[in-house]
Amino acid sequence: MLQLTYLIILLPLAGFAIQLLWGRRLSDPVAGGVATFFIGASFLVSVGVYLDLLKVQSPVRTFTQDLWTWIPVDRLQVHASLFVDPLSMTMVLFITGISMLIHLYSIGYMKGDKDYSKFFLYMNLFVASMLILVLGSNMLVTFVGWEGVGACSYWLVSFWFTRDSAASAGKKAFVYNRIGDAGFLVAIFLTYDKVHSLEYSTIFANIDKIGPANITAICLLLLVGVVGKSAQIPLFPWLADAMEGPTPVSALIHAATMVTAGVYLLCRVNPLLHASPDAALVVAIVGAATAFVAATIACAQSDIKKVLAYSTVSQLGYMFLAIGCGAYEAAIFLMVAHAFFKGLLFLGAGSVIHGLHDEQDLKRMGNLRHYMPITFITFGIGWLAIAAVPPLSGFWAKGDVLENTWAAHPALWGVGIVTAALTAYYMSRLTGLAFFGKDRWSAEVAIDAEADLPGAHHAGGAIPEPHESGRIMTVPLWILAFFAAVAGVMAISSSRFSLAGWIDPVFGTNLYNDHLGSSAIWTLSTVDAVVAIVFVFIGLRLWMTRAERPALEAAFLKGAWYINELYDAVFGRPSERLAAFCAEVVDPKVIDGAVNGIASVVRGSGSVVRRTQTGYVRNYVLGIVVGTVFVLGFMLTRLWWS
Amino acid sequence: MTHTPFPFLTVLVLVPAIGSVLVAIVPRHAVAAWFHEALGVAVSVVTLCIAGTIAFKFKAGFGGFQLASDHVWAKDLGIHWSLGIDGISLFLVLLTAVLFPLTMLGARARRDPRSFVGWLLLLESACMGSFVSLDLVLFFLFFELTLVPAYFLIGGWGYARRGYAAIKFFVYTFAGSAFLLVGILAVAFIHQSQTGVLTFELPALMHTHFSGTEGVLLFLAFTAAFAVKAPIFPFHTWSPDAYAEAPTAGSILLVAVMAKLGTYGIVRFDLNLFPQASRTLAPLLLTLAVIGIVYGALVACAQRDLKRLLAYSSLAQIGFIALGTFALNSQGLSGGVLQMVNHGLVIATMFILVGWIYERRQTWQVSSLKGLQSPAPVLAGIFTVAMMASIGVPGLNGFVGEFLILTGTFVAHRWWAVAATGGVIVAAVYLLWAYQQVFHGAPTTEDTKTRDLGWNERLIVAPLIILIVALGVFPKPVLDRITPSVNQLVVHVDRVTNTKVPAGLEPRPVAAAQQHPGASSAIAPARPPADLGPAAAVTTGGTP
């Protein structure tokens, strides 16, 4: 099966090709079924490859598949080749698995959309790009996937392109990603300059050639790419806007997979990061700061998807905190657990939005537990999991991160535990507003069109009674809920599912060893659990009874710390003015003015010889034609004679 | 060197010219209305087949000129009908051969198709001639000859301000060419004073020794013509007017093919003739290139007219080509040459599409168009692919060229590459902005009536899209032919300038000319011994 690794990517690509060629001729559910089938097939091949990889008996299980020579110029030889090891395999398994479930869900969710097949076209291309990203054996193949997922994200965020807000959000997502990608590119150039290769294995083998300063530079440049893709400070504002996309897109791309690409990349280059403690510290600080800031913003949002979006940013911050501490395995653990529970929460939110006829405002929900019981139960599992209530997966994964942080940087642990409290609080606020309390959706509300959420297709008034979603949407919910609940078994080192036993050889000695005694671990875990339970209680208590508590929803937090406004004032508007100045003054007046000035000077001084010059360009042109023909004719005759 | 009994390159140049004459002598009223256009397409397709045969005959992994033919024309003046093709010119010839028939099909004349087709064929002949000429005078003649059809195409079939645009284009580029002519003569006379032989053939002249000042001045004279033609910042102000006012066919060919005459001229003549000056002045040219990239992108952001936006985006793209060229190493130059082809394909696709939008809506103003993706999804999809290629999304051709250029530049001149990478970001801004304005949003009633692409139109852009994808995924066959020629050039420049290349970075030895059986014996006696470089060109007709 290892030899079939390329099929993991080729199958989603085949799905893409079929949708591209015949998509518009496939009827409603068929297009979705075809797309889901190819992702499912890719998942099965992944499982096969995984089982084969298990049979490889060596300290580090790896397999490289060279497909073709992509860019060969002199000593720069870039191959399109794939690299399978426990790290990339973990990514592949959860990407294909979760993608399959979300594709299945989308068959129901996107029903009746006029661009039904186009949705699955982009989704399949996205999955293929994401798999290229994680399977690439060199930085450039990773970059192909990196840009590919960015492009797909652009198409999918602006999927409902007739809405200006969706179109703008897609553009914003792409541009923010591009800023990051520029950093990634420069990191690639610098790496090539130092080791003359982009293969990860060659880079890591020649790490002494790079030199400490350059390693730090490469790591920080990669971090620029990472903060763009994974929505960290300072490039995080695009993710909230990206919620304009259909909800399955938010679940797959902006929660479970694409945004975790940064986590994967930094884990992939762990030897570099290990060699540069400074860069690692920057990663940890960026992660902790983002986790905290995003969590505070999530506390004050009233759009259900925006809460989840900021929550994703915050959780990703935890993962980078772990990476910065050298706890790569903890980061991967949280990433996998997060993919389950955040994917679940988004799909649950999608079910709610669907049931409420495209209403996303939490303040217009309430008491949905009686109308959407399956959604409520599964969403509830996701809620408790992300809040880190034991024994659900989030408790183990977040506990792992926080223990390592405690041992490495106790101050950052403080930020982490405060964020954990905020997480439990805002998720309980969300659950309380949506599923508990009185139903507010039945009330007539006068909604002025400008304040209305872009997602709401109705102008106002009462929403018809909510309904539970169909089975094609609830089955994926149940499956994700199951994994969100039990993924904690990966933490048990003696179990067959132990993540550490499987993935730790990838990191070897680069993995941070926290040396905490069992009493310390017990104490920390107890603190985590107590914080989670207390703040779940507080959040639920506060928000299941009342929907309006202005004191707890500061404008500053609602406005996301006014980051957008700040960037607009500092970068956006000045560069617009600069562009306008160049286009209206520099180009026509200065540069072209100089050209015309020279021309008129020449014309003035040429007045003496003007007699022979008619001034008509066509006469000159004719002169050239005649002259050229004459010269060519002369030569041809000479040629004839010679 | 390769001997070829059949003068492929001469035929390549002459077929479109003969076609042009045919079109001119068949009177309009004697034949059916479609005759001249059909004849034009047929001739350009024949030319494409010849170019295809040349590509088929071309040996990969070999850096010198191939399929060469050399006939003395004016013995006293030392002018030769000397043609040859190498990896640097091969794909520009193919690009030209592919784009002319597609342009004739996709961007037809609104009136008087006979003259239109005639001028187009003459332009094709002149472009082909420029790309395969190895004699400086011959090159100059073809280079100048391109101006004539281009002038008439803009002036005759252009839009509102066509007269102004045509004159500006003509005078500006003609002024640049004056420097080139003086430069060519000076090079030949200096060579004559050193060797006693008057010749205009590049393989001989490239071994001429110039003093520092001579080299710099001559380099500047040559570059003046090429920088205007390309155009390179700050010599670009004719281009937005010319591209915007020209008929669609004119815009396509001006920017996709004729602009490459400028960048090709720099690679072929500046670098071969004046290696020392090229290295000395590289920082200047790199700086202009980077300014072009950033400035072009910035000004493009402020454009409200699709054609002008594409014109400024081209300024940025040409900046990338110049950047790679003056990295003066294997990656940068190969990337630059590849990017000439890539940019040609992508910008041609965009101009064809914009032309079709104009056919439907009679406007290029971004503000008059909205939500076209709803009524015209195929048009939108194809525009998206071209846009992503232009932005440099990997998997499409633009990325490969851009990556090679930036890598090469980074190795040689780190900070210029970093600054240029910033330009990559801005490219996304203006193209996505334009796309959003034109294709996204809720369409108005007029917008909803916009017709999507028909099957004929899809077939016209299909080859371009296929090439855009193919060159992005599997550029190896192209690079395997470009790189050996580029490496010869890099070795030539390094040797003349005595540049010590760091160990591990020197270009790999290529199948150089003298290693090829029969090469040295076939060299014309008047020329210096061929060692490396294009000097290895060999005559087919024998020297008289």
Image: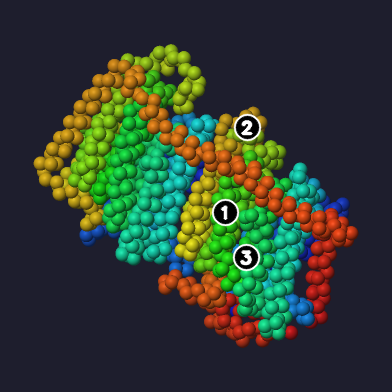
Instruction: Rate crowding at label 2 as few (under 14), some (14 to 19) or many (20 or more) other CA atoms within 10 Å.
Output: some
Q: Answer whether labels 1 and 3 touch (C-beta < 8 Å).
A: no
Q: Which of marks 1 and 3 is in front?
A: 1
Q: Which residue is drawn at 39% across and 32% down?
A: A561
Kind of residue sitting beneath label 2: Thr
Q: Distance between the residues labelled 2 and 1?
A: 40 Å
The residue singled out by tag 3 in the image is: B266
Q: In this view, does A52 lie to the left or right of B103?
A: left
Kind of residue sitting beneath label 3: Ile
Query: Picture quarter containing residue B452?
Result: top right
Instruction: Rate crowding at label 3 as few (under 14), some (14 to 19) or many (20 or more) other CA atoms within 10 Å.
Output: many
Q: Which residue is drawn at 68% across and 66% down?
A: B221
* Image quarter (top left, top right, bottom left or bottom right) of the C terminus of chain A: bottom right
Q: Which of marks 1 and 3 is nearer the N terminus?
A: 3
User: Looking at the image, which residue sits at the far right?
Assistant: A611
Nearest the camera: A355 or A49? A355
- Element marked by disc 3: helix
Percent from the top left, x then y, of residue B495? 53, 76
The residue singled out by tag 1 in the image is: B291
Q: How far apart are marks 1 and 3 (CA)?
A: 18 Å
The residue singled out by tag 2 in the image is: B448
- Element marked by disc 1: helix
Count the marks: 3
Q: How far apart are marks 2 and 3 (CA)?
A: 47 Å
Nearest the camera: A181 or A555? A555
Q: Which of marks 2 and 3 is in front?
A: 3
Q: Do labels 1 and 3 share a chain?
A: yes
Nearest the camera: A339 or A507? A507
Q: In this view, does B195 lie to the left or right of B27?
A: left
Instruction: Rate crowding at label 1 as few (under 14), some (14 to 19) or many (20 or more) other CA atoms within 10 Å.
Output: many
